[in-house]
Amino acid sequence: MTKADQLEQKNTHAPVLLSESIDALVVRSDGIYIDCTFGRGGHSREILNRIGDTGKLLAIDKDEAALASDNCKQLLKDPRFDVEHGSYADLSRFVKQRDWVGHVDGVLMDLGVSSPQLDDAARGFSFMRDGPLDLRMDQTQGMSAAQWLAQVSESELKKVLQDLGEERFSGRIASSIVATRLDAPIISTLQLARLVEQAVPRRERNKHPATRTFLAIRLLVNHELDELQQCLPQIIPALKTGGRMAIISFHSLEDRIVKRFIRDQSRPGDSGLMGHEPISNPPRLKKAGGIVRASTAELKANPRSRSAILRVAERTSVCA
Ligand code: SAH
């Protein structure tokens, strides 16, 4: 393989649960669809393959590199396809701008990071490759991991490692980070990875000791759980009756948010007007099938699919 081929291969992302998610999502070929997480467009491409000439697809990604990729440029030649740089937490703005409120047939979210983000050392997502400690998906916004680590208090750091990374040695790691940064700022991925390695007394099997720390910091600097929580309620008014949402998550904290949201919206709500009899509103969603995980063949071909969970729900009658 030539160096150019290797680079090209590095810049790709094997879409996870591709046919399972798109089979569940695209039930009408003339519909309007939104892919909230373009990445390298594996799912977007498949949606375009399934919809007819009058169908439309909007893709969103907060990473400029995703939208600057050859895959995106190629898909933009298709008049049915459009992209927005930004967060899916702004979904309703993108929907309103297009007059799509109540007209969308399907919304897809394939959460987390893409392979090119992990593979590019310069992005700082990987504790296996040395690079600047950035970890932001959108480098045009917010604080890098290095900036955050430079100013966070020890107690806050411990809490983040515990809550978002489920790291049992959060106290030791936090105190080691705070002690180290007195001498020199923590600015590179390998510097942080080594520091964590030295701070933890025991290793988990088959897991680099810095895995949980990097996950926690990534979730924090990208506001991943908050933005997911903001996005989900914006999907419902966008959908038409029978419109679907298909969400692929990769770890338990994400999946819990999705599962609870679908469960809560699948129950009758009460509008709780003060001083009046509570009015029971009909459920706004209903589950479409159970949870779906990767097949044995996909697990073999793509280890990233190991933790993937797909959940699908359908908009109940919009007028009800
Ligand atoms: N389905 C894609 C891969 C998606 S990977 C494919 O087949 O190629 C997840 C993508 O979601 C990443 O590119 C990441 O930048 C993007 N992303 C993560 N959080 C986001 C957010 N809040 N808003 C928009 N995009 C986000």
Image: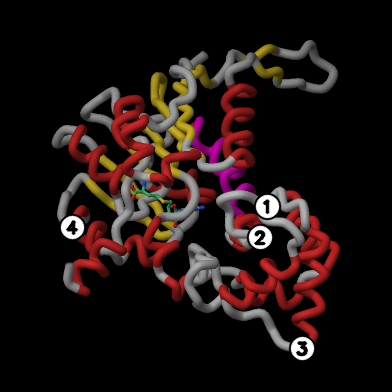
Residue 9, picture quadrant: bottom left
Disc sitting over residue 165 in the figure: 1
> Disc 1 to disc 3, how far (Cα)?
26 Å
Residue appearing at x 50%, y 66% in the figure: 126
Indicate the position of residue 253 as horizontal and vertical percent values: 63, 41
Which amino acid does the dot numbered 4 rest on?
Gln
Disc sitting over residue 213 in the figure: 2
> Disc 3 to disc 4, how far (Cα)?
48 Å
* Residue 105 in view in this figure: no
Dots 2 and 1: beta carbons under 8 Å?
A: yes
Q: Is residue 171 above or below residue 280?
A: below
- For disc 3, the marked residue is 183
Disc 1 is placed on an element classified as helix
Magenta stretch, residue numbers: 223-236
Q: Is residue 262 above or below residue 201?
A: above
Indicate the position of residue 76 as horizontal and vertical percent values: 21, 56
